[in-house]
Image: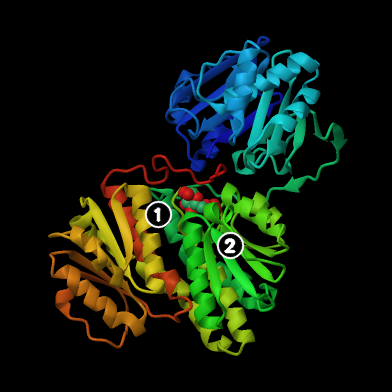
Amino acid sequence: MCGIVGYIGKKNSLPILIKGLKRLEYRGYDSAGVAYIKDKNIKIVKTVGKINNLDKLLNYNDESFIGIGHTRWATHGSVDTTNSHPHQAGSITIVHNGILENYQELKKILTNKGYTFKSDTDTEVLCAYIDYEYTKTKNILDALNNCMKVFEGSYATAIMVKDIPNKLFVMKKDSPLVIGIGEQENYIASDISAYADETSAYIILEDMEIGQIEKDNISIYKNKKEIKYNIEQVEQDAFDSDKNNYEHYMLKEISEQENLMDKLNNIYLKNLDKIMDISKYNKIHIIGCGTAYHAGMIGKYLIENYSDFEVNTYIASEYRYQKIFADDKTLVIAASQSGETADTLACIKKVKKYGCKTLGIVNVKNSSIARAVDEVIYTEAGQEVAVASTKAYSSQVYIFSLLALKLGITKGLINKNEINKEYEKLPSYISKLTNYDYEDIISKIWQAKDVFYLGRGIDYISMLEGSLKLKEISYVHSEAYQAGELKHGTISLIEKDTPIIALISDETIALKTISNIKEVKARGAYVVLLIKEDLNINIDKECYDKIIEINATDNLLQPILNVIPLQLIAYNIAKKRGCDIDKPRNLAKSVTVE
Ligand code: G6P
């Protein structure tokens, strides 16, 4: 969601800006633009659509050694060139990620002072307000400092000032921004993946800090005082954005789950003592958004069922505003792939005021959530480029299984030796599912208008994730239902050949789900049954059209396997429908606004 880049140095800035923007494409965007200084003039080029559209408009002969760039994910105003960034007012040109909440109020003040606005964006107001303060103070650092006292909301902003052509400025609150450090050159980015090839050292700008960036110097200020900063190192191999001959990143990332399980076994299973002991808390709250929320729901189920401890799960965008019952004996677990999701981050800040202990299950190292929590367990999935999360989800579920395992062992409820063997078999089971030929199923259902997913208990949660994957990347309407609930309304939508994907992996309620499948089959549905092998039940061949058997593992790990066919069904339907699988419309991977 909105990517920011910037460059100052000895090279032509345009190719560097475009390269950085391309690296941030994964965040999701609908328009893109750059601003650069050429012969003392600030030039702005921006357009809607993909970065390639912008690329075609650029004149690379325009040598410029300073510039900023942006990918916009529309929040205020439609997707059009005027609303896209950079924005300019007076001497100031900016790109912005975040939402300026009091922009209407500030717009009135500025309009009364003679400012006019071309776009519908909050960003143009933010830009004009900086110009207003700069005109008053004649000192950009003072101006930015004054602005921070007035701006409400979130902003990561890169700023160029017309009469200061040898410096870039940044300021930040609640949206991410980093400064990459080079030799006689420096970079700005929403995250360091944009310039991890160019530099291995970077500074993470913290809230309410202002940065002044020259090609050979960086100064950080807070409350008008220059402050010391830490230099972080980019981890080697942290950003593997090579597609390795796969047609899509999503397929590559689904396939990587096999080796990932091995990696996680080596890092965590063999060092279970390093996994947080959650037994000392009275309450556990799990929060997350989208796929991470689904992983949290699986986590609740695993901890409750295998270690006998009640857990509550919450959608972060709700939790941050709802009444919560939490204190210093409450553990709040935040699951997040990006580590930047604004709502999840806000929840962490909220529960700290209640004295809660916080644990992050996060993929991106050094991300905002990873830094905000008391303890972090990294999911070690490597960079996930496709917007639809796959390997990050299964690694989150894996970590939740370990939390349940550790608690279960502490309580004497789980036998560690037996379960260890099952963890070790995960890669080979996943390999079987990724090599399965889904074509038969896909050819029957890829043109469907609606697809319904059915399951009970923990299987229902996997189906929520399967249904979300399908919606995200294929734009097919789908819903997941608790199998017993369908007949209380939604069964009216089932007609001849409506696809139903059903999952049965919990033996204790398998027969109940089978009855529900028969109800939809009787109404003409086309049923794809995903079933754990070796279930001790009789399944009538007439109650499904296609069946996929999933290896049986311990129930603690079964959800990691169950999701693989669901990911691949969604992927293959989207592929057949010709969708932009890795960058689905309207979606952002890093959701840095609420
Ligand atoms: C967006 C992404 C989803 C992701 C969700 C939460 O909606 O498109 O794939 O599950 O954000 O993101 P997080 O980074 O916190 O896991």
From this viewpoint, is residue 65 visible? no
Q: In this view, does 54 lie to the left or right of 42?
A: left
Q: Give the CA separation, mark 1 to mark 2.
A: 19 Å
Residue at the disc numbered 1: 251
Q: In this view, does 547 lie to the left or right of 266?
A: left
Residue 329: give x, y in percent of width and height. 70, 71
What amino acid is at disc 1? Answer: Leu
Residue at the disc numbered 2: 379
What amino acid is at disc 2? Answer: Thr
Q: Which of marks 1 and 2 is nearer the N terminus?
A: 1
When the figure is inspected, residue 537 is found, relative to residue 200, above or below; the finding is: below
Residue 437: give x, y in percent of width and height. 27, 63
At numbered mark 1, what does the secondary structure look like: helix, strand or loop?
Answer: helix
Say which quadrant the C terminus sits in.
Answer: top right
The reply to whether the C-beta atoms of the residues labelled 1 and 2 are less than 8 Å apart is no
> Would the CB of label 1 be found within 8 Å of ligand 1?
no
Residue 386: give x, y in percent of width and height. 46, 48
Q: In this view, does 451 lie to the left or right of 276?
A: left
When the figure is inspected, residue 395 is found, relative to residue 43, above or below; the finding is: below
